């Protein structure tokens, strides 16, 4: 804490009406497990403001943005892959990741 004040992101995490997540969900190594856990949490929650998909993706984006520069390239890549897994689980269009787009350009 700086000068006795909590960061806004910590206050949001501790006191918001957001869905409850499985402990350690973002520490998992498998992007599919992260996405599955987020989907399960969103579907079980009674405190959603949007659709379960929107809530799950919002929590994932919030974590990525909050962690910011502290995420390693490997962690960031894993979380980006988890976003596409989440899209698949909710039958949404999957976006090309930066890594897959780079590979495709290299082969053409």
Image (cartoon, grey):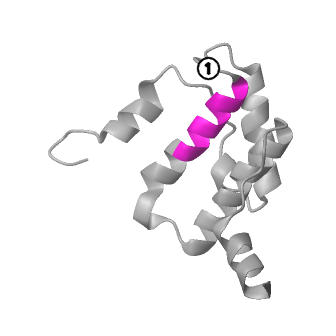
Relative to 12, residue 26 above or below: below
On the image, the x and y values in percent for residue 107 come to: 80, 86
Q: Residue furthest top?
A: 46
Quadrant position of residue 58: top right
Q: Residue furthest front?
A: 108
On the image, the x and y values in percent for residue 71 come to: 51, 65
Quadrant position of residue 19: top right
On the image, the x and y values in percent for residue 52 come to: 71, 25
Location of mark 1 (residue) = 50
Point out the stretch of residues depicted in magenta. Answer: 52-61
Residue 99 in the magenta stretch? The answer is: no
Left or right placement of residue 10 versus residue 24 in this view: left
**Which of the pair 107/10 is nearer the observer?**
107
**Which of the pair 50/78 is nearer the observer?**
50
Residue lying at 75% horizontally and 51% vertically, measured from the top left: 84
**Which of the pair 100/72 is nearer the observer?**
100
């Amino acid at each position: 804490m700086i000068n006795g004040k909590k960061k806004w992101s910590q206050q949001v995490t501790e006191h918001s009406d957001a869905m409850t997540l499985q402990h350690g969900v973002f520490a998992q190594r498998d992007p599919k497990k992260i996405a599955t856990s987020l989907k399960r949490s969103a579907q079980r929650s009674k405190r959603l403001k949007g659709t379960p998909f929107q809530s799950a993706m919002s929590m994932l984006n919030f974590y990525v943005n909050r962690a910011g520069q502290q995420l390693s390239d490997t962690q960031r890549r894993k979380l980006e892959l988890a976003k596409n897994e989440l899209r698949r689980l909710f039958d949404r269009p999957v976006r090309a990741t930066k890594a897959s787009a780079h590979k495709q350009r290299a082969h053409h």
